[in-house]
Image: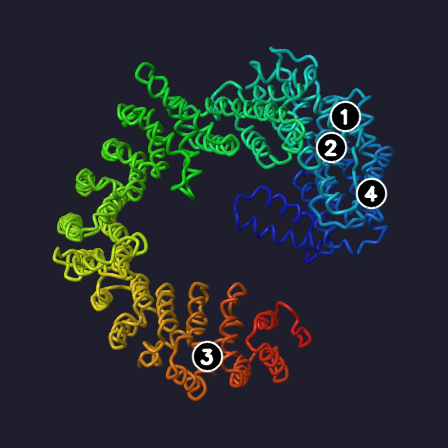
Amino acid sequence: MEMSEGRSLASVINHVERLYSSRNPTEVNSLQIELQSLQKSEYGLELANVLMGQSSANCRFFGALTYGVAINIRRDNFSSGDVISLVNNIEGHIFRLISSEGLEGNMVVIRKLFSDLSLLFIFHSNTYPDPLKIFYDNLGVSDDAGSKEAWITLILIFASILVEDVSKQENTTTIHKVIYDNVFLKVNNIVTGLVDLNVPPKIHLLTLDCINSWVYYISVAEANSEVRYDCPKNIVNYLFDSLTLSGISDSSNESLELVNKTLLVFTEISDMNPRMLDRESKLRLHSSLLEPGHFGEEFMSKVVFSDLRLEYDDEVGNFVNLIIVFLQNDLLNLTKQILEQSSTYKIKVLLSLTNISGIPMIDETLSDQFLTFWEDFINTFIDDEESFRIVFESEPNKFSKFVNRRNEVVSEICGIYWNKIHLPPFDELEPVKVEFLQYRSGVADLFIAAYSLISLPLYERLTSKLIYDTYTLEENKNMSLDIESTLYLIYKITEDYTFYDPDNSPFGLYVGKIFESGILNSFGNLSTSDNTLKYFYFTFNNFLASVTFYLKGEHGKEFLGSILRLLIPMILGGSTSLALNVSKTMLKICQECSQNLIPFTADIEALLVETLKNPGVDALIRQRLFSSYTSIIQYLKNPVEIGKILFHMINEIYNSAAKVMSANTSNNEELEDYLISLISCVCQIARACEIPEEIDEFYTPEEQEVVDSYWKEDPSNVKDIILRIIRLFSIDFPPFVHNATSTEKCCNILKSGVREDINGPFKFPIEIIFDYLVSKVEVSDTGSIPPIYSLVETVIVTNYNKIEREVLQNLIDKVFTQNLEALKSDPYAIKSAVELFAVILERKPSLILGLPVFQSSILKFSLEGLSANENFIIKPVSRFWVAIISLKKGSEYDHTLIRDLFTTRGGGQQLCSNLVKSFILSARSNLDYYYPIFRNLLGKYPLESKTWFLQAFHDLHHEKLNEHLTSIIVNKIMITRGQRSAHDILKKIWLQLNGLIEFNSKNF
């Protein structure tokens, strides 16, 4: 046989064999390209037929694949005769494979051939409407069809693959109707017949797989057509007949594979298409699962609550999952009927399954499966509370019993899960730490839902339990596990319900009792170095962070000293993970309880000194501690005291940094991390020194005057040491001159005071900030430009009315003009520069419009930015041009200047030409950034812009444009008058000129 271009069959077979044996990616790719071209060629079907006749499994499989490719490509060219002929050919290959080698060894190829038949059915259901019947009829006349068992196997596999493949396609209603009328009836009859046949278990397993495929298909068919598969009784009865444990005993090793697959199919039905079960079938399934004397009780007795549970872990999980999915479909009725005897047994079963023995995520996962179910169960009582009141409207006594029973059940659920979240031994917990902690979080969500239903009585029971266990801890050390579990749940509920409104928390009374019980002493006696107790401290710290609403109050402040004395040793002596957790808690307490912590500043200051001396302390811990301390001293409100403390703190940081820098003239990662953490501490101090609320709410007018006057003079030299440390980290220490992180931190320090209304320790005159920037830019590379420009931007946004144009001109000359060529090589520097100019134009255009550098460099720089590929550059460039066109805050002189630039000096034409060219060449995802420039030009220059755009499109020299079409395009743009409709016109132009839609004037 000869293929196209002289390829022989032998060479094709060789290529196929190499395709599946080669380990060379380049060769495999080359072979794929060559073989795919053959599959798609006019020889595709012939090649498939020939390859199927080879003895090689690789050739047969590739032949089956080739049938699929060829059918897909040529599907519209087949006549009815072609379709039937192809069906006969493919079926013939299947029969010969069975006859020569049997089913097992060729199943992969046979399945692929069935997919090929499915494709023919999908594309030609009119000609080939009943694939199963045709296949069955041909089986009957074939000499190669094999045994009856092989017949059934093939038909079941074909019935599965057919609907699986149809489910993947977007089909019309017609094909679903064809399947219902022809194919489904055959499957239903096959399942019915199997009940009476003595077939081996593997046939039943295959039948269940087939039913499962149909369950999914039915949901697809019903969603996309008017076809409805009302309860298919024969199939459903077959499933019930498969729910049997005949012969199994406590010591049996019999496989439950049939039962397992049946459970999975019932779950699929209940989850995806419960309509497949009519009322009678649902009642039957309910009885089977949840009533005494039926399958469920037997399964639980012989498997779930026996020594076989671990052996049949999948089966048990699927049994529980079916119960959950089935009950969730009618959760409202389950909750309504909790007073009925039948529900009592049912809930008892569910609670027993939830309370299965073992540690969650280590020995058992059933309780984890039930978590969402029980949360939904509780939320049903909450969401449908009004419905329950209506049901019991005429029976108030019964409603009271209903509420009591409801609370009993919820309490039982909570009791089970409270016990389940007890921490296991450390060596058992560590391998499943992530899973177990996620489980605990899920339990916390359940308790939060329970609190929404039961309210304070639940919180009171938890706190009473915690207090009792705390009192008895000295006598029974094992109570520590109980304490941790209860405290964890209290913390989670408290955190959730005080997050948005901590000042109105209902928990203050109970939290006070917890502290009064001596819990601080109990935790203080535990070892911080014991791994087993690590999670105890995590829980305790998180609890403390959740109750700052109480600690900042009159009753809570008495415990702050004890808390600090407990936390500080954990930072110095605990593990890094514990110290991080503690520092986070300490930061929140210091921020929330600042005024009450003033007496303890000496303790925290001593801790700061320790962390400064020790480079091994995590950088984040060090930063949090400095921020914590500064938050407290802010509330001294005495600038003299604050000045002394700030100078001492920052000077300590300066000396620590200078000492390290003088001993290290070169950089290394460890040194860099330590030094960056030091300058970050100054950043944290600066942020913490920002006035924490509206100035009039924080300071009285008299205090404002005192503070402003003090910091204007700065007798404590705080500002001097701040500037020295900024210069040390960004200019004087050679290894950090080009360190972008260090520069950013230094700029952020200067930023922190810019917005303040009165003088403060970090508020510097604009001239000092600009002088620093000029000095910094002289030694910087482009990596330091973004934070420098960001600082200038912040200064301009907040102080644009105070800035002299000459000062700004000098700064721009230093940070922009003299570095222009270098800036153009760094996309992030370009972005920062254009953003800065856009901000100036938006706030006070006169600051920049009259500068020589504006017309000589800035305009050209921003024109070039229009053609950038990066959207993070195009976005600020668009902002720049919109600002310059609109000049919303420009003076009359500013408007005259720009109009002259655009209309008299060619600026408008230059902008339009660059804009149109860049727009057409841009990526589709960037088009939105160009639209505002077009719209503003059209709105501001309605007469001039038509000429500009005509010339701009002419200058494109685009092969699809002539003078007539250009005129049509521009007229359509002009008609929009800069309204939003311009977007659609411009998008069509882009699509047409980029060849994505046909270029035609009628498209407009």
- Looking at the rendered image, the disc whose residue lies closer to the viewer, 4 or 2, is 2
Q: Nearer the viewer, residue 844 or 393?
A: 393
Give the label on residue 88, or none.
4
Q: Which SS class for mark 1?
A: helix
Q: Amino acid at mark 1?
A: Tyr
Give the label on residue 298, or none.
none
Residue drawn where x is 32% and y is 24% of the image:
517
Residue drawn where x is 65% and y is 32% of the image:
332
Residue 851 location (% of width, % of height): 31, 80
Distance in Å between CA atoms under marks 3 and 1: 76 Å
Residue drawn where x is 37% and y is 37% of the image:
546
Quarter containing the C terminus: bottom right
Q: Quadrant of residue 965?
A: bottom right
> Sequence order check: which comes first, mark 3 or mark 4?
4
> Sequence order check: which comes first, mark 1 or mark 2?
2
Q: Amino acid at mark 3?
A: Leu
Distance in Å between CA atoms under marks 1 and 2: 10 Å
Around disc 2, counting alpha carbons within 10 Å, would you say few (fewer than 14), some (14 to 19), or many (20 or more)? many
Distance in Å between CA atoms under marks 4 and 2: 27 Å
Residue 989 location (% of width, % of height): 59, 73
The residue beneath circle 3 is 911
The residue beneath circle 2 is 211
Q: Is residue 672 above or below residue 468?
A: below
Give the label on residue 238, or none.
1
Mark 1 and mark 2 residues within 8 Å of each other at the beta carbon: yes
Q: Amino acid at mark 4?
A: Asn
